[in-house]
Amino acid sequence: MDKHVEIADFIQHCTEKAQTTSARIIFPEGSDTRTLHAAQQLTEEVGAAVTLLGDISEISQLAEQTDLNVDNFNIVSPKGNGNRYVGLYRENRPRTKPAVAMRIVEKPLYCGAMMLKAGEADLVVAGINHATRRVIEAARACIGLAKNVSVPSSFFVMSFTDRPPLIFADCAVNVDPTASELADIAISAGTNAERMLGVPAKVALLSFSTRGSAGGARVAKVKQAVEIAHERAPNLLIDGELQVDSALVPEIADQKGEASSPVAGEANVLVFPDLDSANIGYKLVKHLAKAQAFGPILQGFALPVADLSRGASVDEIVTTSIISLALT
């Protein structure tokens, strides 16, 4: 087994990888004390260069109140900074009038995404003051999706004490993906698993059926998704439709005639057919198997964008940032 899979502390593994990137992180929500503390930790723990967006005097005052050295950060006000990005924004949206584009790129989420698009950062981290849909809207408008990807999605890293980590996708964004969208989710998750875990991805598309043991439209969707994924990413190990025990347990995979499958019994990426099963699945594993759930981590964009819950703690902001950096 590859040494990377055996690392007990998954976050330490990601931290060590992030330390090699000389990362530049942008926080569009700079006027939040949680952001300030997280930024401080990231500069100290991974050597990140952090840019905070917001009112400069307000952020400076907050830093002083929290006993943080504002000299550690680059503070940028989106207001009055839009001229730098109007032209770049309109390259993909030429019908947008310059005055309208100016108003858009002076919004913090959009300004941060444009800075990433312009090559001035490696990662944007947002969401503690904005809904996930707003983060995704800004990323789609300014950055766009990765090549051949039709839909943004997300994944959780499920970290265990007695087995290697698993990737669960998509647990936060797409309610009922089509077969084509499910294929894109599988490809994105598999690609990110290889980047992050340092081992070949073995991607299982899950169902209540294993290889035709049941039928119906929902099974047919997963089967079609597997076929599409094979066409789009022939170098990734992707298989299905598989029940979750067939995907994870070698003995059960053999009993169900899956000995020749490159994935069955050895999957490290589980792709759920819809948001119901994905959300239920990761929470069951988190609470009953006492696994740590890191995420959701956004995927599918041309450049790295991380989303946060609005109740995220400082530690959660740092953790999400570090995992996202491990993907760059």
Image: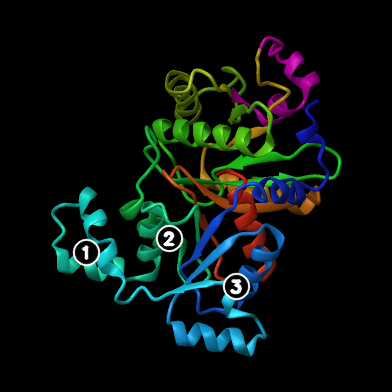
Report the Cα–Cα distance between label 1 and label 2: 17 Å
Per the rendered image, the range of residues in magenta is 241-260
In the rendered image, the vertical position of residue 8 relative to residue 39, given as above or below: above
Hey, which quadrant is residue 64 in on the image?
bottom right
Q: Amino acid at mark 1?
A: Ala
Q: Secondary structure at mark 1?
A: helix
Other-residue count near label 1 (Cα within 10 Å), few / some / many at <14 / 14–19 / ≥20? many
Which numbered dot is residue 72? 3
Residue at horizontal 37 percent and vertical 32 percent from the top: 148
* Image-based side of 100 in relation to 304, left or right: left
Task: State the residue in front, 211 or 197.
Answer: 197
Hey, which quadrant is residue 199 in on the image?
top right
Which numbered dot is residue 101? 1
Report the Cα–Cα distance between label 2 and label 3: 26 Å
Which numbered dot is residue 135? 2
- The answer to whether the residue labelled 1 contacts the one labelled 3, judged by CB atoms less than 8 Å apart, is no
Q: Quadrant of the N terminus?
A: top right
* Residue 158 covered by magenta stretch: no
Residue at horizontal 30 percent and vertical 66 percent from the top: 105
Residue at horizontal 86 percent and vertical 40 percent from the top: 162
User: Sequence-wise, which precedes: disc 1 or disc 3?
Assistant: 3
